[in-house]
Amino acid sequence: MADLSCNIAGVHGPNPFWLASAPPTDKQYNVERAFEAGWGGVVWKTLGEAGPPVVNVCSRYGSIDYNGQRMVGLNNIELITDRPLDVNLREIAAVKQAWPDRAMVVSLMVPCNEAAWRDILKAVEQTGCDGVELNFGCPHGMSERGMGSAVGQVPEYIREVTGWCKTHTDLPVFVKLTPNITDIRYPARAAREGGADAVSLINTINSITGIDLDTFAPEPTVAGKGAHGGYCGPAVKPIALGMVSEIARDPVTHGLPISGIGGIATWRDAAEFIALGCGSVQVCTAAMHFGFKIIDDLVDGLANWMDDQGHANLDAFRGRAVPNVTDWNQLDLNYKTLAAIDQDLCIQCGLCHIVCEDTSHQAIARSRGDDGRRVYTVIDDDCVGCNLCNLVCPVPDCISMVEVDNGKPYLNWNDHPNNPQGGN
Ligand SMILES: Cc1cc2nc3c(=O)[nH]c(=O)nc-3n(C[C@H](O)[C@H](O)[C@H](O)COP(=O)(O)O)c2cc1C
Ligand code: SF4
Ligand code: SF4
């Protein structure tokens, strides 16, 4: 069987699947059962300074259902751990001692001054944990107190705080980035400049789940009011993949270890993040939706696929997708595909015709066959190969996009005669 063992920035585990810093990793009881179930590591729920812990509100989660599927997106207005620091530290030490082969990374968030970071690092080091993750990502509650994404949105702060942490600990330092920023490369570069051993991304996306149209209160609702929170779950995976790919292919951050997070629910999701260069993957919403046992499918699925593909270990395919992510102006404008409808599979619902007629290129004709049934046919000369009909067709494999050899050479926008800034 394929070797799933993982080593990212010197943090080892038997597989790349870590539970992300969140409720699943908030206490010894949870983390021990996660390890019993087979998780390769955890990032412990974010710790704050010593002293009275933060206070959380009731009604702290909201979610988006779509077409009968529950929780395609999860929103939360939860803060960092609301349990005392000494209790968490004691439990982290106990779990690490009992499970020495699992990755134990501890998430941290304290005010932006060097003494606060120095003190928490010294305390956390005593637990025997394998690394720390600096939470520069949470977009709600703590950010209003100058922490979380308030740091993650300012590259200078990231560089400085990461530098302090590298000065005050020898543990590997992961910097967890916020997606609530225009260009993820800048915070990632700042993390590397500060000495980060790895970056983790994404944290949650600023959001309001919805508005209750009876009470006109945002959801989740706390005594008639609501505040923006952090969005995660399957809905955010494309955003996370996009950001991971930007860091993986940026010459300034290329090679910086990445722990991928965001909407990972299946082994395929995980494989995609690893193909974009991730050294480990973190899961929160899927565990909160289905429980710790999903690790069985994650591990078995990934191992089976790797066996089928002949990938002996994670390094065999890690980063393989990175060279294929490019800029739009490098794409081949002469690449040609056409839609093709399998008439044997078609159920004559007409959706492909409607969407192409109303919103694309009027390239699917509707006619009547000899038996009176509707027939939908692609007009090759009008089809621009946009994929839309293929995406909406309810029957699997009924519409395929067929590559056409038009004999034309590779031509990108830089060299295109229509480009006013270049070309011929
Ligand atoms: C209820 C909840 C609480 C969270 N708390 C934290 C936290 O304390 N620290 C942190 O770094 N991220 C926190 N997160 C963010 C997750 O670690 C993760 O980055 C995010 O949920 C994306 O992963 P997912 O799509 O698998 O859920 C929290 C997420 C949720 C849903
Ligand atoms: S690929 Fe686009 S243009 Fe071609 S038939 Fe389908 S919807 Fe129309
Ligand atoms: S959407 Fe698919 S099933 Fe429906 S008419 Fe078009 S090809 Fe047939």
Image (spheres, rainbow, N blue to C red):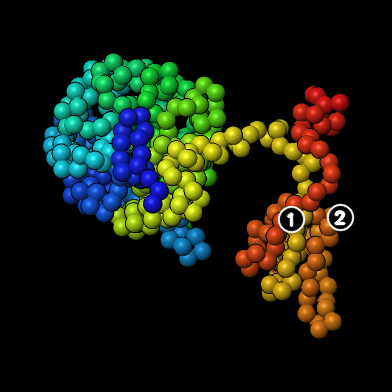
Q: What element carries label 2?
A: loop
**Is 21 above or below relative to 71?**
above
Q: Residue at x 77, y 55 (%)?
A: 338
Q: Residue at x 41, y 36 (%)?
A: 279
Q: What residue type is labelled 1?
A: Val
- Say whether mark 1 is within 8 Å of ligand 2: no
Number of numbered discs: 2
Q: Within 10 angstroms of label 1, few (less than 14), some, or many (20 or more) residues? A: few
Q: Can residue 312 be seen in this view?
A: yes
Whether residue 151 sits left or right of residue 38 in the image: it is right
Q: Is residue 143 visible?
A: no
Say which residue label 2 marks: 381
**Is 344 above or below relative to 104?**
below
Q: Distance between the residues labelled 2 and 1?
A: 14 Å
Whether residue 29 sits left or right of residue 274 in the image: it is left
Say which residue label 1 marks: 402
Q: Which residue is drawn at 70% across and 72% down?
A: 346
Q: Is mark 1 on a helix, strand or loop?
A: strand
Q: Residue 34 placed where, x, y %?
A: 25, 50
What is the quadrant of residue 99 in the picture? top left
Work out whether mark 2 precedes mark 1 in sequence or the reverse, and give the earlier one.
2
What is the quadrant of residue 351 in the picture? bottom right
Tell us which disc is closer to us: 2 or 1. 1
State if disc 1 and disc 2 touch (CB < 8 Å): no
What is the quadrant of residue 131 in the picture? top left
Q: Residue 51 placed where, x, y %?
A: 15, 30
